[in-house]
Image (cartoon, grey):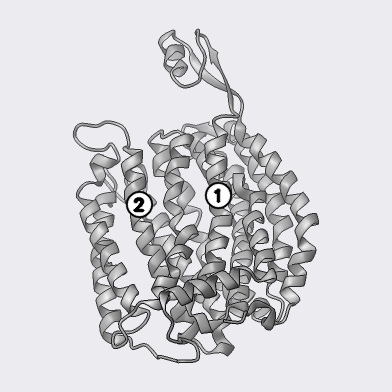
């Protein structure tokens, strides 16, 4: 949202979307996290504590330079998208390493009977993080929002700046990590956390990947989210492009917080049983349908705008309703998927098995999103209205210099949405039966001889 508000094009945003890929490739170093540790300190704390300290340090250092990187420095300029991508890729690589440690710790921290609740903890934690890092930040960072609702005298900046936000959370990371290091002790269970070397762990991982059940499930994870890739990656950006304030879009998430906290607990009653993926399958048709509704809302936005940044009341209501329904089905799929992973993961190889499944799941969401962002400009048709020249690459400037303006005649977003809907319907016919079969398999089908 911050990049869209700074007029960063979709190709550059596709490049920036690679910052999420560490969560899709963390499997490459997951066996190292399982095999290398300091026994007296704790198997998971060996990795969790240093990575969290480094994340905090990254945030503190970045807070002093983020203005220049974002093009907000005294010299102005454009967003340095390449540097921004590299920095956040490294930051997310640390976060992905932390994620591996937490995945493994959850399997030993919780009893086997309660391990299905790991997905609930994960979901509630992500909801809290999303609210603090996205909703609250975007609202307090926006000068328009703060001047309108929180201040008596207008100012040029919001109450919170990106630099100040990074600095604050850098300090929080240092403080909380220190508390975890001092207070929390690990329970070592030789049945769940056996001693294994690095090569042995990689060998076991390869054997797991070769399992027929894992191979089939991998195909499902890599293809299941194509159906809503355009909707999830582009809808909010298209609304902002049409004039919808980004902070107001973020505020829409506030009424959803009670739903997002309560929903995983409610869903867990269904996913903690023997067939957690039934909820996953039932949610897909509704998300496909919502993708069509969202495309209609984006189209409607240009007619519902009363004045710049202000829309008709009915538009807010419909958008909020669609967003609420979308969150219900997103969380239903997420919780059921995480519960299924906890159910079938073999705890004898620590966090590696869980990391394998979560990594493939992340990759299944990231590659379609990156593709949609990169492709949307290429399949969007524009024409020069009132001038000469075309509206592609450098031609855009030619059109403006001749007194014209570039007008979108065919928006690639709608083309992508239609393609994704068709792919989603075909996917349901192709893979739904196989997913039901995998859901019904005994746990022994997910284990291999080590």
Between 387 and 9, the one lying in front of the other is: 9
Is residue 338 visible in the rendered image? The answer is: no
The residue shown at (76%, 69%) is: 436
Between 389 and 91, the one lying in front of the other is: 91
Give the Cα separation between the discs numbered 1 and 2: 18 Å
Quarter of the picture containing the C terminus is bottom right
Q: Is residue 15 above or below residue 276?
A: above
Q: Which residue is mark 1?
A: 367
Q: Is residue 102 above or below residue 323?
A: below
> Mark 1 near mark 2, Cβ–Cβ under 8 Å?
no
Horizontal side of residue 62 vs 308, given as left or right: left
Horizontal side of residue 319 vs 69, given as left or right: right
- Residue 443 position by quadrant: bottom right
Q: Is residue 192 above or below residue 239?
A: below
Q: Which residue is mark 2?
A: 88
Between 188 and 380, the one lying in front of the other is: 188
The residue shown at (64%, 50%) is: 226
Residue 3: x %, y % from top left: 40, 40
The residue shown at (80%, 64%) is: 433
Horizontal side of residue 339 vs 98, given as left or right: right
The residue shown at (61%, 82%) is: 449
Determine crowd level at label 2: few under 14, some 14-19, many 20+ residues with C-alpha closer than 10 A.
some
- Residue 35 position by quadrant: bottom left
**Residue 115 badge:** none
């Amino acid at each position: 949202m911050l990049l869209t508000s700074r007029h960063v094009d979709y190709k550059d945003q596709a490049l920036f979307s690679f910052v999420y890929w560490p969560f899709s490739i963390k499997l490459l170093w997951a066996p190292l996290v399982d095999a290398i540790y300091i026994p007296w300190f704790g198997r998971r704390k060996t990795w969790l504590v240093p990575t969290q300290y480094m994340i905090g340090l990254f945030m503190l250092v970045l807070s002093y330079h983020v203005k220049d990187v974002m093009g907000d420095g005294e010299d102005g300029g454009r967003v340095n998208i390449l540097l921004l991508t590299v920095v956040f890729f490294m930051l997310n690589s640390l976060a992905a390493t932390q994620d591996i440690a937490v995945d493994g710790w959850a399997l030993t921290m919780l009893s086997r009977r309660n391990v299905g609740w790991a997905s609930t903890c994960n979901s509630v934690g992500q909801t809290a993080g999303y609210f603090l890092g996205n909703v609250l930040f975007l609202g307090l960072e926006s000068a328009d929002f703060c001047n309108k609702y929180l201040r008596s005298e207008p100012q040029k900046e919001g109450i919170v700046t990106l630099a100040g936000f990074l600095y604050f959370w850098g300090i929080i990371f240092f403080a909380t990590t220190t508390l975890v290091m001092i207070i929390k002790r690990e329970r070592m269970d030789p049945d769940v956390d056996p001693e294994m070397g690095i090569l042995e762990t990689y060998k076991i991982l390869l054997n797991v990947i070769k399992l027929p059940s894992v191979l089939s499930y991998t195909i499902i994870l890599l293809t299941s989210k194509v159906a809503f890739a355009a909707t999830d990656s582009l809808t909010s950006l298209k609304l902002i492009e049409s004039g919808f304030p980004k902070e107001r879009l973020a505020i829409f998430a506030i009424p959803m917080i009670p739903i997002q906290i309560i929903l995983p607990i409610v869903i867990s009653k269904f996913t903690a049983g023997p067939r957690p993926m039934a909820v996953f399958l039932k949610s897909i048709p509704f998300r496909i349908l919502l993708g069509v509704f969202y495309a209609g809302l984006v189209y409607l936005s240009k007619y519902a705008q009363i004045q710049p940044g202000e829309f008709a009341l009915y538009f807010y209501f419909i958008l909020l309703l669609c967003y609420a329904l979308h969150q219900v089905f997103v969380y239903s799929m997420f919780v059921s998927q995480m519960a299924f992973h906890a159910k079938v993961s073999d705890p004898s190889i620590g966090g590696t098995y869980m990391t394998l499944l979560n990594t493939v799941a992340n990759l299944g969401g990231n590659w379609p999103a990156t593709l949609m962002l990169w492709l949307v400009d290429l399949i969007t048709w524009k024409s020069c209205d009132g001038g000469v020249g075309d509206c592609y690459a450098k031609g855009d400037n030619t059109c403006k210099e001749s007194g014209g303006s570039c007008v979108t005649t065919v928006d690639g977003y709608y083309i992508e949405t239609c393609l994704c809907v068709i792919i989603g319907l075909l996917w349901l016919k192709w893979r739904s039966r196989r997913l039901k079969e995998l859901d019904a398999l005994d746990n022994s089908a997910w284990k291999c001889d080590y």
